[in-house]
Image (spheres, grey):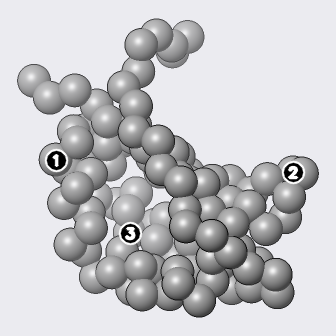
Amino acid sequence: MSIPHTVVVILEAKQGKEQELELALEAVVEPSSSEEACLEYRLHKSVDNPAQFVLYENWASKEEHQAQFDKPYIKDLGAKLGELLASPYQAVFAQKIISNA
């Protein structure tokens, strides 16, 4: 049995590119969520910084998460990020320890 893999990605848009980044991120939510191995895929926007976005992802395994990078919609997003991000995105990879669910 594989261990579920959680990924939290923090992205900050360049000034004036906030809406464009938000739309680019929104475009990957549905296809990512539709992947069989995707357990959860959420896009959040910071309440303190309108240029900052957070992707919260849960995948069936690390390997399944890695396989997502071969998908055309993720490659399309990757091609856009250079012109949209103020700085490189930060990614945290985690495994659940305990939950209330």
The kind of residue tagged 3 is Pro
Rendering coords of residue 39 (x, y %): 36, 41
Label 1 or label 3, whichever lies nearer to me, is 1
Q: Residue furthest right?
A: 48
Disc on the earlier residue, 1 or 2: 2
Question: Which residue occupies 38% across, 62% down?
Answer: 32
Amino acid type at mark 2: Val
> Looking at the image, can residue 40 be seen?
no
Q: Residue sitting at 74 percent across and 79 percent down?
A: 14
Q: Which mark is residue 50?
A: none
Q: Residue sitting at 55 percent across and 11 percent down?
A: 100
Residue corresponding to mark 3: 31
Horizontal and vertical percent for residue 87? 63, 70
Check disc 1 and report its element: helix, strand or loop: helix
- Answer yes or no: do the residues labelled 3 and 2 have beta carbons within 8 Å? no
What label does residue 63 carry, if any? 1
Whole-number angstrom distance, CA of label 1 to CA of label 2 = 32 Å
Q: Classify residue 66 as left or right of residue 33.
A: left
Quadrant where the N terminus sits is top left
Camera-near label (3 vs 2) is 2
The type of residue carrying mark 1 is Glu
- Up/down of 2 relative to 47, above or below: above
Q: How many marks?
A: 3
- Label 3 residue SS: helix
In this picture, residue 55 sits left or right of residue 70? right
Q: Are marks 1 and 3 in contact (CB under 8 Å)?
A: no
Residue at image position (28%, 31%) is 4
SS state under label 2: loop
Measure the C-alpha gap from mark 3 to mark 2: 26 Å
How far from the left and from the top, in percent, is residue 98? 46, 10
